[in-house]
Every structure is written in C-alpha cells, then in structure tokens.
Amino acid sequence: MADQQIILDRLAEGVREMDEDLTIEASREALDKNVDALTAINHGLVVGMNQAGLLYEQEEYFVPELLLCSDAMYAGLDILSPHIQRADAEDKFKVVIGVVEGDTHDIGKNLVKLMLEVADFEIFDLGRDVPPADFVGKVKEVGADIVCLSTLMSTTMDRMVDVIELLKKEGLREKVLVMVGGGPISQAFADRIGADAYSENAVAAVTDAKRLIAPKKVAV
Amino acid sequence: MATTEVMLRVGSHWPEAHKKPRDMARLALGVCHFTGIENLGVPFCMTIEAEAMGAKVNLGSMTNEPRVTEYPLVKLEDWKLLTGINPGKGRAGIVGEAISYLAEGNSELPVIVNLTGPISLAGSLIEPMVFFKAMGKHPELVHEFLCFITDNLIVFGRSMLQAGAQIINIADPSGTGEILGPRRFAEFALPYINRILNELQGEYQASMVHICGRLQSIFTEVDQLATNAISIDSNTSISKLRSALHEKVMVGNISTYLLQNGQPDRVKEVGLNCLQKGVAVLSPACGISPATPLVNLQAMVSAVHDFDYRNREVSILG
C-alpha cells in the first residue's frame, strides 16, 4: 500500500506540475501495479487538479497553468478511465453551462466546467454565444440542478437577466439554481438579478455549487 | 462606444455602422453631440483586425456587438498561413475612410482610434485555450505568432493615424493580469503593446492602454507600459493604482453597470468621486452597453464640468 501511495502522489504531482509525461508514466504504472483505476483517478489525478485549483486561488497559478494542468489530467484519464470497474451508475448532479448570447469569450466558462467535472458533476456544455431559449431548453430537457451563466463583456451582462426571466416564465426558476460569473460580474450584480450565487473563479464555483446542492442532497 | 438612443437619433445604426464609413462617422459624431463626450471614437468593435486576418465575424445587431464566430487557425504552428491586415481593404479600409470624414469635419474634438491588443487579437485567431496552453508548451512559437500580430497591428494603427486620428487607444481584454498573471503578462503582453506604442510614437499626439479586470497583480508591469494614460476597470482601485504608477495618469472608471442601470444623480456622484480620487480623464470603466441611457452619459459629462478642480485631494499624476 505504501507503493500505491507513491503512485498516487506521482499522479497528483504530474497534474499539479503540468507534467504530461510524468502523469502518463504514473498512470501506466498504476495499471501495472494493479492500483484500482477509480482510486488512481480520484486519489491521484483529481487531487493534483484540486491542488492546482488551490494554487490558482492563491494567485500562484493563472489561466495558462490551470489549462496545462488539465491537459496532464486528461492525458492520465485517457489511460485510466477504460479500466474503471463500473459500479452502478450513480446519479450525479446536473449542470448546464454556457457563455451568454453576444459573447464568445469562453475561457472562464471552460475552467468552471473543468473544475465541476473534477468535482463529479455531470456537465452539459452549451458552448458560447448561447441564446436564452437554449439555456432554458437544456435545463428542461435534462432536468438540470444548476445552470451556470458566464460572460466576459460588460455589454452582454444583461443577457443573464434574460435567461432568469425566461426560466421564471417557463416555471423552472424554482427548480434550478442559477450561478453567474465572469470579468464584469460581481456579487452585487448577482444579487440584483436574483441569481443564487456569484463565483469569482473556477475553484470558488465548485464550492458554491456544492453549497447550493447540499439541501438537495439531503432531500435525496 | 455607441448607444441605441444615439443610433436612433442620428439614423445610423449597428450593424450597418460597422461597415459603412459615413454611418460610422455619423454615429461617432452623434455620440459626442448628444452626450457631450469630448472625443470622437472609432471603430465600435474589436473584430476588424481579426476579420482582416481571416476570422469569420458575425456583425451582430443594433444591440449586440460584432463577434468572432470562426477562427482561421487550428494549430498555432500554421500562423504563417494567415493573411496580413491590408489597411486599404474591407472593414479596415472602412475605418480609415470614417476617420477621414471625421478629420475633415473640422471638429475641435480629437479622433481616438481603438486598436485591439495583441493577446486579444491572438485569441480571435485561434481557440484561446490552445493559445494559452502554448505559452507553457511552445513559448517560442507564441512569440513568433505575437510578433506577426504586432507587425500587423502597427500597420493598421499607422493607417488609422495617417487617416487623421490623433489618439491611439489599445485595449487588451484577454491579456489581463487576472488571466495571465504577472510573469506571463510581462513576457507575452507588455513587450508587444510597448512595441506598437514605440513604433508609432511621433505619429500620435497621445496614447492610452485599457486593461480590463483587477490590476493589483500587475501594478509593476502596468507602470512599464509605454504610455502616459492607463484606462482602468471599475474593480481596480484608483488610489491604490495611483501610488504604484510613475508619470502616468488614470482614465476611468465609472461602472458600466451603473451607467446602464443607475440613476443620473448617482452616476454624477460616482463620477465626481473618481475625479476627487485622481482620475485625469473621466470615462466608463469598460465597453458600455448600447442600452445605456443618454441621460447617464450626460450625467457623467456633467461631473467633469461641475467638479471643482481646486479641491482635488491628490495630484492626478501617479
């Protein structure tokens, strides 16, 4: 088991240090030494990605670093995920995410998507420049627990209001939690438009999402 | 910047005003006429450079800005296949024509041209995720690409200045301290913005750089920008930045959200407060929404006229 911990540490290190080669090597080693694939992912790769997220929050890492960490993580996942012993498919919480209409800047959205995926949410990514009706349609279709709206541009902030209004009109507002984020967005703005949370960055978004769904978890 | 109210009053609307020189000029004049803002600013979007280099652009509507819908590059190493900006062609040429109209108009107001910053232009030519990752994996390739982009921005910037503009404003919303961090800002953003400013020096009367977001992490680097004026977002503190700057003035920074949704009295109050704290040029903190009411822009301008400059608590020079 000491061996296993060394491998798990190497997996985490590979991701945290943006080292794709190390991550790949450690992933193969994990398989060779019969480390359970799911353990290797959750206690190796995901740990590394969370450490990277922490460094990002501490402003040691910025967007390029976080993206490089994610590349290393996905390189490891490619090797490990085919070997997961599928237990019964657990019900994950569902998140619909996208950049609002009029804006095509999606780096922030992609980071949030990445960190939520790491945190075991099921993501439905609508991409960018997404009309309000598409958000609402997807929320309805998949029975989403959370919808995440992102924009970098101050000129398109109001499209978030449009989505919330449309959710109300369709009688869905009470069923889905709304999270907003992006350069020009603030807590004050989120409060004004009646969103459930404003997340300052991708790591905070995970904390917020977990906090928001906590009551639902109890209900289940 | 432009608003739908002004568009309706002058009869020149987006998206037509992005592609017809007379409409573009008329709208810029209308903004000054109806708001009292003291410069003529064109173009109204950040997609002209990318379009001239092969990106596909959706010109949007009366209420939505143009945006890039398709990148010409898939792999960064193919950057040599990109076309350079031909300043006489397409919408690049149209901006030049619009500037000529404005310059010929004998207006006393300076014409200010908005040039897209190198990192933002890069992010309009290739998927930004690919570009940002290359900063770590293939920095030399990123530098080659940014050199090429910068050469083209200099060509386009020069053409706009030669058409009659006096002031150049470089805005780089994707090249912020929050996105890049100080180390990569210093390596990939600062030198290229400075090269544009330095190579065009003597061709403009004044320059300005706008950087979105919180600047705290890159105060030192911002101070090294080769311009006298730094335009800042509403979430950067005027007083904190001032103490970090040398020989630079600040431009800004009334929240665009307030401008769109607040009351004129409040806008004026915030404007007076910005001036009190030491901004040299009062302006919106970032791109304003076209839905911004005219009365609020007028209120912003009235703050400039009604402020008692003798009472300024600090020097405006950082």
Image (cartoon, coloured by chain):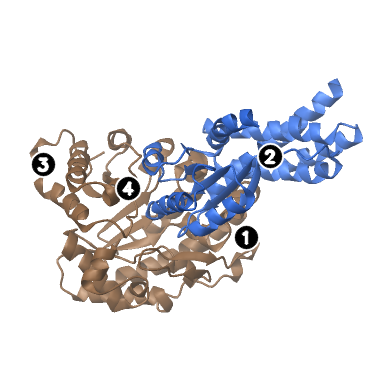
State which chain disc 1 sits on: B
What number is the disc on residue B76? 1
Q: Nearer the viewer, residue B197 or A78?
A: A78
B79 left or right, relative to B208: right
State which chain disc 3 sits on: B
The residue under the point 44% across, 50% down is A160
Q: Quadrant of residue B267?
A: top left
Residue that extends furthest to the front in the rendered view of this protein = A171
State the separation of the CA atoms marked 4 and 3. Answer: 26 Å
Is residue A186 placed above or below B114 in the rendered structure?
A: above
Residue B99, image x, y percentages: 28, 72
* Colour assignment, chain A: blue
Circles 3 and 2 in contact, beta carbons < 8 Å? no
Is residue A144 placed above or below A4 in the rendered structure?
A: below
- Same-subunit check for callouts 4 and 3: yes
Q: Which residue is mark 2?
A: A92
